[in-house]
Image (tube, grey):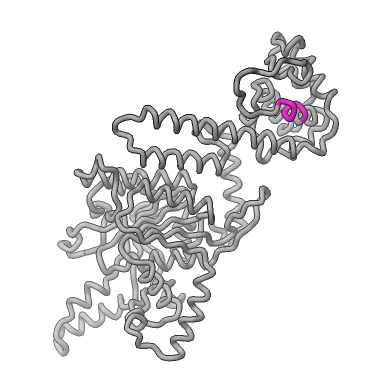
Amino acid sequence: MAEAARKFEVAEAPLYREAPNNIEAEQALLGAILVNNDAYYRVSDFLKPSHFYEPLHRRIFEVGSELIRMGKMANPVTLKTFLPSDEKVGDMTVAHYLARLAAEAVTVINASDYGRAIYDLATRRALITVGEDMVNIAFDAPVDMSPQSQIEDAERRLFELAETGRYDGGFESFNDAVKTAVDMANAAYMRDGHLSGISTGLRDVDRKLGGLQPSDLIILAGRPAMGKTSLVTNIAFNIAHAYEPAQQADGSFKAANGGVVGFFSLEMSAEQLATRIISEQTEISSSKIRRGEITETDFEKLVACSQTMQKIPLFIDATGGISIAQLAARARRLKRQRGLEVIVIDYVQLMQGSSKNSQNRVQEITEITTGLKALAKELHVPIIALSQLSRQVENRDDKRPQLSDLRESGSIEQDADVVLFVYRDEYYLQNKQPEEGTPEYEEWRLKFEKVKGKAELIIAKQRHGPTGTVDLAFEGQYTRFSDLAEEHHMPERYHE
């Protein structure tokens, strides 16, 4: 604690290289708070006790913060009760030191400037720690740690430092967790549709899920031709198109509605995805767009749609066979540079794990899904990951998917917060069309008319709500899912 008395005692300059700090700024801020507790609110939204260099200052700020938040007075008299009375600060007692801090305080006007200086210096000290760890690990790297994995680890720590000012995890008080939950409820109340999560743009899906929840891993699965990519593309466009930024107190921007979407397309090119979205928005068949069979009016629609699409925050990465570590690094970079509210991955089975699991596909998928769930929590965004289903679905009379149909690994079901299945009875029925004029044909026609242009989104698992089925409209020529019209809207089928 002798360091804390440096302002009041002349000492020789240290011969060693000292970590960046400003004891005088810490003393000035604490003195301002002790004289006028309103100064605390000028720094409380960004400054934490851990940002102080001097341990005694951390404790003073921590105790003072607790007293002020409880509505009590924080001054040298009230604080000294909670601080060690027998310790010395130079030749002063702690009580004497508190009195000197208050006496030396000049003004509270510069409190926020002092707070920013303390915060910036704490960030620089954290950067030094990250840098030292990088150097030490590079010199003495374990045999199984490649340089690429070290780069990815350093990038993760730097991202977390840039986002939160902390690079290490730790316990969070229940009081902070409750405050976060209340803030989330308030955000849901203020947001269009009163959703706690991000709206998918599909009314009945939002009612069931409450929107896409931050930190959730959402698996969207189905057999080929069911429309997985079409549905997730529709949702991604709806979210990006609804994006409305709102400026925060620290000058950064956060989505009030909608959001910035990062779309990792491992199967289709960016041009193919864009064509799908254009087809959906203009109601021009994607096959006509590809073949150039469009009229002048259609072309004008395409131009108008492309101008709209250029403005929306939908970013596509079409790298094939991307690894979970590469995906995480690119997602962090996107969030830092442009912001990020939702990640979409099409699809999980095309991703790669680490080389050590490359010989065992089940372990590789387990590594990927575990990594995706960890990334969703780290970035605090929902991740929608598409997945294939096993062929055993085709061997059943009722071809509606079940959780046991998820392909290659039980970890997909285990790690996912929400599991959705896309199912279209129309696809299976149209391949069973009997000869016209027969009694079987009439029975088939009646069944087909009931399911034509309709799809089921089966919610097979949801940690935060009920399971069940949502009925949607599907227009295959435009690869578009939408809400069923109210007059055709079937009641939701679900169970708690």
- Bounds of the magenta span? 23-28
Residue at 18% x, 60% y: name it: 391
Residue 42 percent coordinates (x, y): 74, 40
Give the total of numbered labels. Answer: 0
**In the rendered image, which quarter is residue 494 located in?**
bottom left
Q: Residue 452 vs residue 111: left or right?
A: left
Taking 277 as reference, is 494 above or below it? above
Nearer to us in this view, 5 or 389: 5
Image quarter of the N terminus? top right
Residue 423 x, y percent position in the rendering? 30, 66
Using residue 429 as the reference point, say whether residue 251 is left or right of it: right
Q: Residue at x 53, y 50 (%)?
A: 336
In which quadrant of the rendered view does residue 84 lie?
top right
Chief secondary structure of the magenta portion: helix
In the rendered image, the residue lying farthest to the front is: 15
Relative vertical location of residue 99 with respect to residue 42 in this rendering, above or below? above
- Residue 273: in magenta span: no
Relative horizontal placement of residue 277, taking residue 225 as reference (left or right): right
Residue 471 can be seen, yes or no: no
